[in-house]
Amino acid sequence: MKCRVCRDPAVIEVRRHNAGFCHPCFVKHCRDQVKKAVDAYKMFSENERVLVAVSGGKDSLALWDILVKLGYRVDGLYIGLGIGDYSSESAQYARSFAKAREATLVEVDLPATYGFDIATGSKAARRAPCSACGLSKRHLFNSEALRGGYDVLATGHNLDDEAAVLLGNVLRWDLAYLGRQHPVLEAGGGFVRKVKPLVRLAERETAAYCVLEGIDYIVEECPMSVGNRHLAYKGVLDDLEESSPGSKASFLFGYLERGSPLVAGVSAAEREALHPCPTCASPTVSEVCAFCKLVEKATAKR
Amino acid sequence: MKVIMRNPRREIELRGPLSVTSLLATTEVRREAVLVIVDGTLVTADATVEDSATVELRPVISGGSS
Ligand code: SF4
Ligand SMILES: [Zn+2]
Ligand SMILES: [Zn+2]
């Protein structure tokens, strides 16, 4: 197989584009896709300060690397979730990445700062681990970005992630979630701007980018992810993609182009109802925010 | 050849040379679900793996939901 761009031998094929790429042309392809997403969705400018949420996995480290290479002002944020060896190993990957590039990594440790880990929080609040984890991360991403004076928070969600989330939202016809599912969520009501610059790259591409560029990341999966719904949705979409390459991309981008404008009003209305949480000042629609409720349950004396 | 698989990590021995396509068929791994790394180098599905090589089939699917 030959590189579509320069005809040198290819190292990776991207079925969706029906193309192979050599190492330099693939790296350029990835950075171009990110640049295209940043510009097309007006995510941020060269002067703005970006905080990238890094997990130690392939997506967020590839994202951090690409944004730095594109010349943006980026720092990393790592949240320690207290998930045993998985957390300690993934933290090491994030730290070595930052150290090798003399980049700034902000760290917050959930157990050390808030007194509970994901397993405890999940049990105490009777939420699935990924639900307790997701809500903690969203809260901490936002509050850390605000605290550090960043203009924007970037996450490593890729094309496969976004397509799987979209499928889940559509299966439940969850209009509020659908309204919020966009590569850019503007700042407002106590929320910092949130962006997903990897939406135009599949997870196979971010993994290949890391391998080619010598970025070490945690390959092992979080032990809590086993059997979660997100993976089931990915499986369904992978089956579709296998028989008709490109269907994931057209599902997601068709929605963003034609479906998303129709439901944007639902989440705008929701934002109107936001007020600061009395305990932590984070925006919420309930009396006390979901994170503070989780902290309270997880640290209550039993 | 030595074939390294992940999640959980395990190793199997196969006789080479073998095309990447038949290697994936033998191990029942879907091409799009992994990167094929031969002696540290990423290869495409039309590559051939020699008997002396070490191959890693590295999964690319991540499971976090947020
Ligand atoms: S898989 Fe679930 S529990 Fe593990 S890091 Fe991701 S969201 Fe958190
Ligand atoms: Zn090329
Ligand atoms: Zn709160």
Image (cartoon, rainbow, N blue to C red):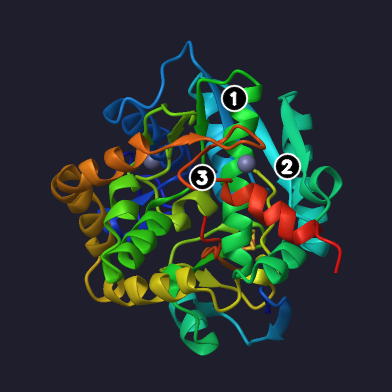
Q: Amino acid at mark 3?
A: Gly
Which one is earlier in the sequence, the residue at label 1 or at label 2? 2
Position of residue A25 in the picture relative to residue A107 (left or right) = left
Q: Amino acid at mark 1?
A: Leu
Q: Nearer the viewer, residue A204 or A274?
A: A274
Discs 3 and 1 share one subunit: yes
Q: Quadrant of residue A221?
A: bottom right
Q: Position of residue A120 (x, y in %)?
A: 77, 66
Q: Nearer the viewer, residue B11 or A285?
A: A285
Instruction: Report which residue position mark 3 lands on.
Output: A156
Please give the name of the residue rendered at 16% of the width and 51% of the height, measured from the top-left corner. Answer: A259
Please give the name of the residue rendered at 20% of the width and 56% of the height, measured from the top-left corner. Answer: A250
Quarter holding ligand 3: top right
- Of the 4 image quadrants, the one containing the N terminus of chain A is bottom left
Which one is earlier in the sequence, the residue at label 2 or at label 3? 2
Furthest residue toward top: A47
Q: Nearer the viewer, residue B23 or A170?
A: A170
Instruction: Report which residue position mark 1 lands on.
Output: A146
Q: Secondary structure at mark 2?
A: helix
Kindly tell me whether mark 3's CB lies below 8 Å from ligand 1.
Answer: no
Q: Position of residue A142 (x, y in %)?
A: 57, 35
Q: Could you give the CA–CA distance between mark 1 and mark 2, rounded to whole angstroms?
A: 21 Å
Q: What chain is tagged by disc 2?
A: A
Discs 2 and 3 share one subunit: yes
- Would you place residue A256 above or below residue B46 in this image? above
Q: Amino acid at mark 2?
A: Ala
* Crowd class of label 1 (few under 14; some 14 to 19; many from 20; radius 10 Å): some
- Would you place residue A191 above or below residue A93 in this image? above
- Would you place residue A127 above or below residue A274 in this image? below
